[in-house]
Image (cartoon, grey):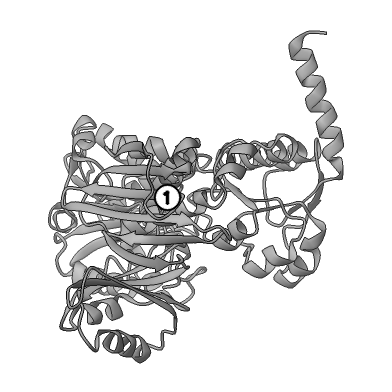
Amino acid sequence: MTKTENMLSEVSTASKGTKMLKVMVADEISPEGIELLEQALTVSYDPQITPQQLLEQIGEYDALLVRSRTKVTAEVLKRGTRLKVVGRAGVGVDNIDIIAATEAGILVINSPEGNTASAAEHTVALMMSLARMIPAADLSLKSGKWERNKYIGCELFNKTLGVIGLGKVGGRVAQACQAMGMKVIVFDPFFNPERAAELNIQSVPLEEIWKRADFITIHTPKTRETTGLISGAVLQRVKPGVRIINCSRGGIIDEAALAKAITEGRVAGAALDVFENEPPTDSPLLALGDKVVLTPHLGASTVEAQFNVAIDLAEQMRDYLTTGLARSPVNLPFMRPEILKSLGKYVWLAEAMGAIAGELSEGTVKEIEIIAYGGLAAKDTKPLAVAALRGMLLRRMESVTYVNAELIAKNNGIHVRESKGEQSGQFREELSIMISTDKGVSSLSGTVLPHDEPIITHINDHPINLTPARYMLFTAHRDQPGMVAKVAGALGKFDVNISTMSVGRKGVREHAVMVMTLDDPIKPELVSELTKIDGIHMAKFVSLLPASQIPS
């Protein structure tokens, strides 16, 4: 028997052994995906399962596959005592509690590539339909009319397209529109100007998008920063006659403000595939007739996309349960079990520190450096570098995994550096993260205590004792009486509860940092109010949740 035949035989034997493993498919997926899963696993397909039924049944399953309908909450994960993996057939994982899954040691996987082409093509289709008034003209002709003079559109050729967010979908849209002769400008805080020049795309500040673009298309995740990004105030500053397209996430556009701007003639029209509330039964856009093109969240609704994400997830789930390997892990690094065991909680700490350092940094990121000290330097620290990088990137963009984080960094001109040192100060092992931008450097250090507790020990050279939490408030202030009371008072005014507090200072009445871990997320207006307090130089809300999972 050849080596290849031996391997196939081993896989076949392993697959037979995994027939005892059970997977719940809780949303509709392509039949081909179900068939693939059934080759190796016992499948329960219930695409209409209710939240209560899921809670009652999940304890019987080793794996759970969902799309966007099913919410994988902390309670679902807690009751899923046998769960090893949760798969999302698609890109966004905002319906899965990632932190709870990670704490429970449950792998979360997704399909980041399966519907990219479909979403990009739908964006271009909406843009062209809006420009040439195709839906309205089609409806008119079918009602027996011949209104050639009524439906006079505009060309895309030579028009300026403003792309907000140049990820996979945004990049495809930009290239397609360039091919049609459009001038493309882009705003993306992570997109490197040098890379933009290579693609013949001009990287500009967001204000330039509002001033120059004839068409604006949105390709950014919904975060606290992007919610309501296109507001009434912004719509007062856009180029008169602009047309706006959104196939990314609902809630990024203030729909009432957009409807008002269209009615008043400042905006020529809009095409939306996503809405703040779905279905959008009360959206004012529904009453605007020919001025808008609206579709019911069809970005990924092609035969090919449905097939691709189903097959990709089914293959990953089958492979993970049979071999321990997965192509697109969202929350746990892709590494050998013995290395993961050796590094322990440092992987989680590295990702948390990367997220915090990234949020505390100002400007365009140029480099992230990971430095291991003491006993940690003797280990394979590559996974720590990837974890820190993913933590930094995940707060600003979607679809970042341990597999693609380095490629995303490279494409955005971010250099990743690993260093090692022999001494670690007061700790046997220590990890430092340094992020360099065009405006300065932010650094954090941390360790894992003997009782397996990860802590942050320094923030920008300020000693501190901080256990990273889901929600945190960071302030930089002058060390003087009353500062804690002022910050606590502002939080109380907004009904935000404080869990713990840590203060680090270099000396009496000198510069200090304070970190409060919170039970609740805080709104941007509260952060703005904190920065107005005399003595506070900086206030930032930081969450370890992916941006799309932070409550608005």
Return the residue at label 1. Answer: 430
In this picture, residue 322 sits left or right of residue 307: right
Q: Secondary structure at mark 1?
A: strand
Q: From where the camera sits, is residue 227 visible?
A: no
Q: Residue at x 56, y 39 (%)?
A: 334
Q: Residue at x 64, y 62 (%)?
A: 70
Q: In the image, is residue 456 above or below residue 114?
A: below
Q: In the image, is residue 417 above or below residue 297?
A: above
Image location of residue 265, percent across then percent down:
19, 68
Image location of residue 424, percent across then percent down:
38, 48
- Quadrant where the image shows the N terminus: top right
In this picture, residue 405 sits left or right of residue 478: right
- Quadrant where the image shows the C terminus: bottom left
Q: From where the camera sits, is residue 456 visible?
A: yes
Q: Residue at x 68, y 44 (%)?
A: 30
Q: Residue at x 56, y 57 (%)?
A: 450
Image location of residue 486, percent across then percent down:
27, 88
Three-letter amino acid code of the residue under disc 1:
Glu
Q: In the image, is residue 476 above or below residue 184?
A: below
